[in-house]
Image (tube, rainbow, N blue to C red):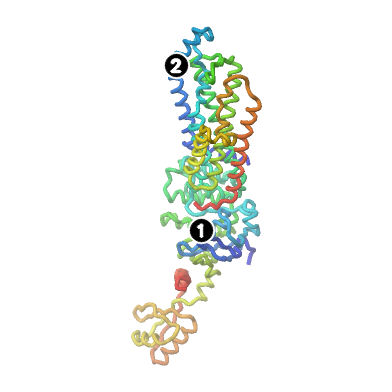
Amino acid sequence: MKNKLYAEYFKLLHKPRTYIGPAAMTLLVAVALVALKYGNQFRYMEERLSQDYILAGSFINAAFLARFMLFEFVVFMFLPLFSSMVFSDLIAGEASDGTLRMMLCRPASRLGIAAAKYAAGVTYVLALTFGVGVLSYAAGWAFLGRGSLVSLTGGIWVFPEGQAILRLLLAYGLVGLGMAAVGSIAFAVSAFLSNASGAVAGAVGLVVFSGIIGEIEFFAPLHPFLLTTYMRVGWLFKGGIDAHALLQSAGVMLAYTAVAAAIGFAAFARRDVLS
Amino acid sequence: MSGIVIQAEGLSKTYGRCVAVDNLNFTVYAGDVYGFLGPNGAGKSTTIRMLTGLIRPSSGITRIMNLDIKNNRAKAMQGIGALVETPSFYGCLSARENLNIFAGLSGGCEEGSIDRVLQMTGLAGRADNKVKSYSHGMRQRLGIAQALLPKPHIVILDEPTDGLDPQGMRDVRQMILQLKEEGVTVFLSSHLLFEVEQICTRVGIIDRGRLVMEGDVKSLLKTESGPVEIRTADRERSLHVLSGVSGVRVLSCNGESLFINAVPDAVAEANRALAQAGIKVYAVIPKNASLEDLFLQLTEGSREK
């Protein structure tokens, strides 16, 4: 297993595609940083809070930037796209390149190969998600300073720095689990296909579709079963931390991950390699 | 005869209504260089994929070293090198890095193995270049290198000379002969019948998913009807006489020589008919049938059915 894991991490680190996600997210953090530092979007809010003696000085800091990077477009579009791109490449991409055929001619069990690939994919999405958090906090600290987190989710909430970091860790953790679930869906789809783009479209399409359904009141009975319901982390930045909701979110996303991974493993073990 | 190392029993593969391989049976013995022949679309690659566990048979069994591939693929593939169709590699990695990855999937390899196979395939000088800069022929050589990496006792090669220049083709032939001398069993699929005739000890010919002939190359070429050269004093009259002998087909004429295709009994009958007609027969010389003759005869015959 050690050799297989080494092979997968080595390939992952040497493929240019691996760096598209981190590069895009770095660019996005930089854009957000510039917009927050020099833009007027939150200036009015700062003045109002200052006039009402709620807060003195600027609340645009490292914690605010790290929280800002969890906006829905990132969580529902960017991160799922880059996560599924890498997961899809693990099986379908290698199948279309013909390298999967070369791998499966070796005396290694298919499940072992699939497990190494899956582990590499999970490592990547967790590193990408937490990387966004760490990068945005570090860049914010360097250029905006650090301090309490002012949250504008459903009111005005002020969390001391320690509380802010805890909430950010929990939020990025949940998003990381969500990305592992999305990646696992891409992994499962890619186990049936010999075309990585099909698997990306399948996984991202499912997230977008699920996100849309989650916004329509008519489908409210379905909302508790949608993955995207639990990928929204805004509730962690208002009031107290609801441990039950936190465990439920983590549980549902882990269940999605486990089911999708099991389907992917079973399909991979049985698939005919024709390309 | 030595022990059986590869065996297919009642092997079939269907895709919907299309039967790619139909109840195929063949046996490869230790030390064989087994040529697996067939026209395009005959089912050679599908068979090799079933042999290496890349696809699952619809029915039947493939065994390597007496281990059923379906249930013991990883164990059966220990010590087996395979090159299935066009070799594919990670273009962003060097040849050495690619081989290192494939060695890892074989459970590691002896120290110096990568250099050994790179040397054998003439790629040592480009070992650290990225594979995306390689030509088709170089990739083919690298494919052979990865097949030889685990010091295999069985090598499965699917069209190994595809894309190679004449020098490269000769190198591969010599490499296979070298493997044979070392006691390695080689299962070789090729379109190049001359190549197969030169290096294979046994052949199996497949057509439309079915095995139409299997056996020792030398005896197959001896026992089957083949061209015979007849030298006579009167070519025109000989042609006329031979046209009336059943089982004899005149292939060509060259000076005083006539080349006919006939089974041994028909050759004797032709000789008798010429003598009865008063034509002097100076020589009857059997010519060895080539594998190409045999292949075309078998596969064309199958198409006529």
Q: Mark 1 and mark 2 in contact? Answer it, CB < 8 Å.
A: no
- Name the quadrant containing residue A115: top right
Residue A37, numbered circle: 2
State the SS at label 1: helix
The chain that hosts pointer 2 is: A
User: Are tags 1 and 2 found on a single chain?
Assistant: no
- Name the quadrant containing residue A238: top right
- How many C-alpha atoms fall within 10 Å of the one at disc 2: few (<14), some, or many (≥20)? some
Q: CA distance from mark 1 to mark 2?
A: 62 Å
Q: Nearer the viewer, residue A80 or A126?
A: A80
Relative image position of residue A102 (x, y in whole percent):
53, 49
Residue B244, numbered circle: none
The chain that hosts pointer 1 is: B
How many marks are shown on the rendered structure? 2
- How many C-alpha atoms fall within 10 Å of the one at disc 1: few (<14), some, or many (≥20)? many
Q: Amino acid at mark 1?
A: Ser
Q: Amino acid at mark 2?
A: Lys
Q: Nearer the viewer, residue A231 or B156?
A: A231
Task: State whether residue A51 appears in this view.
Answer: yes
Relative image position of residue A26 (x, y in whole percent):
47, 26
- Tell me which residue sits at (62%, 37%) in the image: A255
State the SS at label 2: helix
Name the quadrant of the N terminus of chain B: bottom right
The vertical placement of A189 against B34, above or below, is above
The residue furthest front is A218
Please name which of the two marks, 1 or 2, marks the residue nearer to the observer: 2
The vertical placement of A20 against B263, above or below, is above
Give the residue at mark 1.
B45
Task: State whether residue A180 appears in this view.
Answer: no
Relative image position of residue B5 (x, y in whole percent):
62, 60
Relative image position of residue B24 (x, y in whole percent):
56, 65
